[in-house]
Amino acid sequence: AQSVTQLDSQVPVFEEAPVELRCNYSSSVSVYLFWYVQYPNQGLQLLLKYLSGSTLVKGINGFEAEFNKSQTSFHLRKPSVHISDTAEYFCAVSDRAGTYKYIFGTGTRLKVLA
Amino acid sequence: EPEVTQTPSHQVTQMGQEVILRCVPISNHLYFYWYRQILGQKVEFLVSFYNNEISEKSEIFDDQFSVERPDGSNFTLKIRSTKLEDSAMYFCASSAPGELFFGEGSRLTVL
């Protein structure tokens, strides 16, 4: 079975500063990895995904993430955040076979300060 | 671009009432899912459905819950007798291999 850990429940950061949101996963099989963003009272929007190939994945809104198999991590980064990036961010893992169900982390609330 | 659609977007019901949440998955997808998010909490897996039967379910998905694909397009989640703690956002998803596509969610409020 897979599991996902997002150690930081909240991350405050000043506007235009860089940010990293951490995600570690546990799995006995090969996985797919995802980051989603959720704005207040809205649904889940896919930011980026790692399915295979290059371990550095670029997504929407200037976000990127790097898959590190040896550290079982998939940290999300942005070099310069905006006020509009304030939201909840969820990391998710899926196995490469079977039902493809996602297991989500507990989320990290990114608060961008002016 | 094809998308997963859910209805209703918001439903208010009295405790003990039956609720049906509806979803239209992307047409060529084969796996379907329901997830739940209690306000302010993580997104939790409820059930996956493949080939007209449940392929996996979580411990949350007890006898109060059922899923059905009554025709070729709809995928429904029924809660037989709602409880206060069923108040949540319910997300439907369908899957191409390796990636889930989520609907916008149905917010259920149980009074």
Image: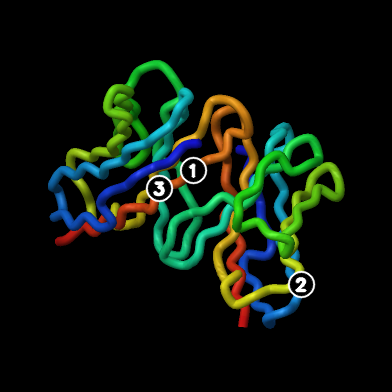
Report x, y in % for residue A49. 43, 32
Position in image of residue A18 (x %, y %): 16, 43
* A76 relative to A91 in the view: left or right: left
Check disc 3 and give the amino acid type.
Answer: Gly
| Residue designated by label 2 | B18
**Residue at point 36%, 53% (across, down):** A107
The quadrant holding residue B1 is top right
Question: Cβ–Cβ below 8 Å for labels 1 and 3?
Answer: no
* Whether label 2 touches label 3, CB < 8 Å: no
Identify the mark at residue A103; answer none if there is no mark: 1
**Tag 2: Cα neighbours inside 10 Å, few (<14), some, or many (≥20)?**
some
Q: Residues within 10 Å of mark 3 (few under 14, many from 20)?
A: many
Vertical placement of residue B63 versus B103, above or below = below
**Marks 1 and 2, how far apart at CA:** 28 Å
Q: Disc 1: which chain?
A: A
Name the residue at 46% across, 23% down.
A30
| Front in this rendered view, residue A103 or B105 | A103
Callouts 1 and 3 in the same chain:
yes
Q: Which mark is residue A105?
A: 3
Q: Quadrant of residue A39?
A: bottom left
The chain carrying label 3 is: A
